Image (tube, rainbow, N blue to C red):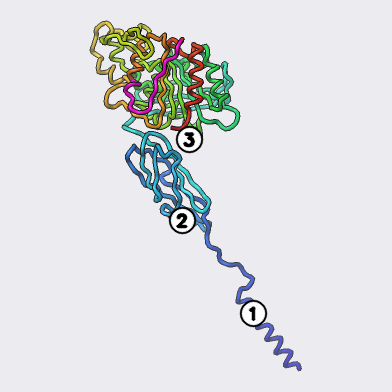
């Protein structure tokens, strides 16, 4: 009896040991799961017609990595700017920005690709700090900036940002005439234009260069180099204020000298990659500085009036050009000095072969007043007629040169921006 009990006890112990060895209740090995995706390079600028291979890399829960480029689902948010194949090969189509995304196992990573034509003049840099908002239009955020560009003195700039209620539909940048030494709201209807655009759901941004005698046009350096200053501010706004990147439009309205900011930014500083819609009004002047300063071209009719308009700059515009060089070059040219003809042409918006004139993903919508008989009209119209992509020119009845000072033009500007500021 005792032997049988011991046998059963020992047998039971053996059973327990054998079951423990089987690991019936212990943890099981789990396969690693995808924890994150990254895309390299993390940003890229390419030209239309060129291609670049992107790589999607997955990081798993055990710390291991795997190339997912051939298995991830790739997409482009703006296929008119660039397309992407199933293996991650991007092809640039036209100037613009697009978000390239790679998705796998419910996770997505995105980076921005910039498509840019030609060899643009280099932009500068911005050092910015928050500033106190003041003025007529209520500001959500204001910034004080030091803007530095190659070949010209650094300049102080201000930006007033007015945000709409809810998620913005996009961003509209406003810059006034001359060298924009004041905010756009300083025009008779400027504040109502900005406020109306904000109420329509867009972030409104006004830019000024308040500390110099002629704002961003204060030389030396010439108009083309000095235009780097506002163009650099526009790029900073895209990166730091607009924030929606390629997923929402950045649009620009500029009056007279502000129209030249738009044209220089597009034709010489590669900003067609970032502007979805632009509305230059009353210009741009400086399209052909050689014609305006040398005064050797015949008077012509503009798009809005049968009156002949001289292409020779008015006295105040000659002074503007002189200020950009910090020398009386334009007034001397008007008196017969042709020494600087080549310099004037180089610094013009229509400078020759290096001027970009195709902006396939930017809607160029140009306004002129029917009562505007300044040289800015034939110059601006010549630039618009040279553009080979989407463009439109309209006349506003009852408007002179400084269009935001006229009620009919103010209504037209608001209607155009609200209807036209969208991704192309």
Q: Which residues are magenta?
A: 383-397
Do the CB atoms of the residues marked 3 and 2 lie less than 8 Å apart?
no
Which residue appears at 45% of the width and 52% of the height? 72
Residue at the location (70% across, 90% down)?
7
In depth, the one of 10 and 267 nearer the eye is: 267
Q: Does residue 392 show up magenta in the picture?
A: yes
Rendered position, 277 above or below 105 = above
Q: Can residue 77 be found in the magenta stretch?
A: no
Which comes before the other along the chain, label 3 or label 2? Answer: 2
Give the label, 1 or 2, closer to the camera: 2
Q: Which mark is residue 65?
A: 2
Q: Residues within 10 Å of mark 1 (few under 14, many from 20)?
A: few
Question: CA–CA distance between discs 1 and 2?
Answer: 40 Å
The Cα–Cα distance between marks 1 and 3, rounded to whole angstroms, is 65 Å
* Dot in front, 1 or 3: 3
Q: Nearer the viewer, residue 364 or 37?
A: 364
The image quarter containing residue 3 is bottom right
Percent from the top left, x then y, of residue 53? Answer: 37, 47
Picture residue at 38% right of the left edge, 17% below the top: 284
For the question of whether residue 121 can be seen, the reply is no
Residue 111 seen in render: yes
* Viewer-nearest of discs 3 and 2: 3
The residue wearing badge 3 is 245
Q: Where residue 70 sits in the image (x, y, percent)?
A: 41, 54
């Amino acid at each position: 009896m005792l032997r049988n009990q011991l046998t059963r006890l020992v047998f039971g112990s053996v059973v327990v040991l054998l079951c423990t060895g089987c690991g019936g209740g212990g943890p099981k090995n789990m396969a690693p799961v995808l924890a994150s995706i990254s895309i390299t390079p993390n940003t890229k600028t390419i030209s239309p017609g060129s291609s670049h291979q992107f790589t999607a890399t997955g990081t798993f829960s055990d710390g291991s990595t795997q190339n997912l480029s051939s298995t991830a689902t790739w997409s482009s948010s703006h296929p008119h700017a660039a397309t992407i194949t199933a293996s991650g090969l991007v092809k640039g189509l036209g100037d613009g920005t697009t978000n390239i995304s790679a998705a796998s196992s419910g996770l997505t990573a995105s980076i921005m690709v910039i498509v840019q034509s030609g060899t643009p003049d280099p932009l500068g840099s911005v050092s910015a700090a928050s500033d106190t908002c003041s003025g007529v239009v209520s500001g959500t955020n204001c910034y004080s900036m030091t803007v530095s560009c190659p070949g010209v003195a650094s300049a102080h700039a201000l930006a007033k940002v007015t945000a709409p209620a809810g998620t913005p539909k996009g961003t509209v940048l406003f810059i006034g005439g001359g060298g924009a030494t004041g905010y756009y709201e300083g025009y008779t209807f400027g504040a109502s234009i900005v406020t109306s655009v904000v109420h329509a759901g867009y972030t409104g941004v006004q830019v000024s260069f308040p500390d110099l005698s002629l704002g961003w046009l204060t030389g030396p350096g010439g108009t083309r180099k000095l235009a780097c200053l506002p163009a650099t501010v526009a790029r900073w706004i895209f990166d730091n204020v607009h924030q929606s990147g390629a997923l929402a439009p950045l649009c620009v309205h500029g009056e007279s000298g502000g129209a030249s900011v738009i044209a220089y930014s597009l034709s010489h500083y590669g900003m067609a990659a970032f502007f979805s819609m632009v509305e230059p009004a009353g210009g741009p002047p400086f399209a052909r500085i050689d014609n305006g300063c040398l005064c050797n071209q015949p008077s012509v009719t503009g798009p809005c009036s049968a009156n002949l308009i001289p292409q020779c700059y008015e006295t105040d515009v000659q002074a503007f050009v002189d200020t950009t060089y910090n020398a009386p070059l334009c007034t001397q040219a008007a008196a017969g000095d042709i020494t600087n003809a080549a310099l004037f042409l180089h610094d013009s918006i229509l400078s020759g072969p290096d001027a970009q004139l195709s902006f396939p993903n930017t809607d160029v919508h140009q306004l002129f007043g029917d009562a505007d008989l300044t040289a800015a009209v034939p110059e601006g119209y010549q630039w618009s007629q040279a553009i080979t992509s989407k463009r439109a020119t309209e006349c506003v009845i009852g408007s002179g040169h400084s269009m935001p000072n006229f009620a009919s033009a103010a209504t037209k500007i608001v209607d155009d921006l609200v209807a036209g500021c969208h991704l192309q």
